[in-house]
Amino acid sequence: MTDDQQPFKQGHVINLPGIIGASWWRESLADTPDPVSRRAAIRVALGVTAGSVLGFGALLALGHSASVEDGGELSVERKSSLEMQRSYGWSFGAASETVTFDGASTRPFERSTLPQLATDLSPRSPDGKPYYGATLFESLGAVPPLKAEGDPENITPLEQVVTPIHTTDMDRAYAQGDALAKLLNETPHESLLVIVDLDGPSAVAFAAGASAGLAAVFAFDNWPHPRGVVKAHRTLAAAAYYQPLFAQLTPSRLPLLMVLDRQRLATYSDDATQFDNRYTARVPDASVLASWGVRRVLYVTPTASDLEEPWDLTADFSTYAAAGIDVKFMSADAISPDYSPRAVSVHAAPRYYYGGHPQTHGWFWRDYPWARGAPPDAEDPSFARPGARYRAPVQAFNASSPTSAARIGTVPVAVSLTTGAVLGAMLSPRSGSWNRSYGSSGS
């Protein structure tokens, strides 16, 4: 008989102060959906149906037990990072720590408006609403219903911690988004979906710059954490900076701009010191694009050296191509400032153009021939046209490539075998004694 076939036998009763979260609570969350882990499972073709969850309902439990100081037994299980944060606070496992905001803005800021962030940044177009990932914005005012052992009674809400940031990278991305939106507005073109995949703050800034011509659909499906491998607090801070701009926008039927954080799959290596707040992207499938009349997709990456989609988008892009949807890549730095002497003397700030010059701006339509009456395909060796030759690969998705995909967005936690209580994250200070007894962090 294997270990997992052995009948359950109660060990010692744990009677430690601060342990909250009985088995009835865990059972009540058994059907709670975990969209992050669910999508990760789908991406790697694990055969899980669309309604399946990988969280409290399908834990990646390690099934080992250990003794705590008073002789009680515990197990180390992997649970959804997002659900742990929702239940025990955004800083679960590191409640005495906080986050920092490099590039903090000096502009006057009304903190009382932060609770409206999820509403102010919601899609202006009804088509985008099903794909709006407001998870990050909803973290601001969240109050945890439970407390893990050793955590303070009250954890400072994120809305009291967040400070808007404003950086030169954000200014550049804003100008790039503005230039692209003007291109799309000035030239009649076939229906197009734009997907921008930049580092979080730059992605938000790009969307703000493009807001006159594209309807942003933010898809940020995680929460910040003091030790988070994804620096989601900076994305949140950038959103707070541009909140007044988005708050004044009105509903419209503009083409959609899906906004992704390229750091969502950041390198993660150490359960003991890092909190896995990663997640996988969610974009409309080919049938949805067809129902919208979209036959073109422009995927925007940071630089010409990044002209390849992360693995979590390969299946979607391959499906697009198979359905006859034309997918092309463009690096954001293909739109660059005009630093010619005349431009510098006339304009207080450099203006951004496709190719870096007013005369190359319209060549976008030559490189991406989706417009009616596009400029003729005349070669000019002075402009390398970065990105125009790239297309999404049409290939079978290799389900085994991201071998740890099923664990994305999960955290090892100590769980009492007696009560079912979550004692805390294995990266917390309390986990030192658990690790000494247990002998492993369970990773």
Image (cartoon, rainbow, N blue to C red):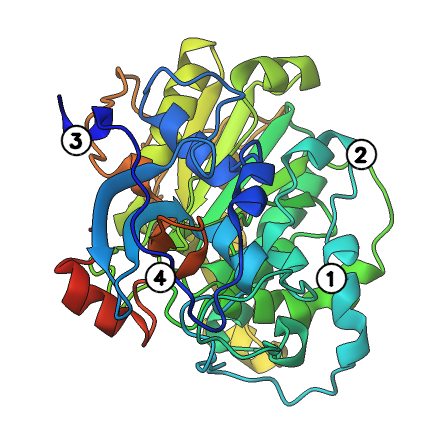
What residue does disc 2 label? Answer: 253
Q: Secondary structure at mark 2?
A: loop
Q: Secondary structure at mark 4?
A: loop
Viewed as shown, does residue 9 lie left or right of 131? left
**Where does residue 184 sit, x and y in percent of width and height?**
65, 40
Seen from the viewer's position, the closer of residues 217 and 418 is 418
* Residue farthest along the top direction in this orientation: 323
Residue 64 shows up from this direction: yes
**How far apart are the two marked residues, 4 and 3, measured between alpha carbons?**
29 Å
Q: Earlier in the sequence, mark 2 or mark 1?
A: 1
Residue at image x 65%, y 52%?
Answer: 210
Dot label at residue 275: 4
Labels 4, 1: front one: 4
Residue at image x 83%, y 39%?
Answer: 252
**How far apart are the two marked residues, 4 and 1, measured between alpha carbons?**
25 Å
Seen from the viewer's position, the closer of residues 127 and 17 is 17
What residue does disc 3 label? Answer: 3
Q: Quadrant of residue 44?
A: top left
Q: Earlier in the sequence, mark 1 or mark 3?
A: 3
**Where does residue 122 sit, x and y in percent of width and height?**
74, 48
Dot label at residue 397: none
**How far apart are the two marked residues, 4 and 2, measured between alpha carbons?**
39 Å
| Amino acid of disc 2 | Arg
Q: Earlier in the sequence, mark 4 or mark 3?
A: 3
**Where does residue 127 sit, x and y in percent of width and height?**
73, 29
Q: Secondary structure at mark 1?
A: helix
Residue 384 shows up from this direction: no
| Amino acid of disc 4 | Phe
Q: Earlier in the sequence, mark 4 or mark 1?
A: 1
Q: Earlier in the sequence, mark 4 or mark 2?
A: 2
Dot label at residue 117: 1
Task: Give the vertical position of 160 relative to 79 (above or below).
Answer: below
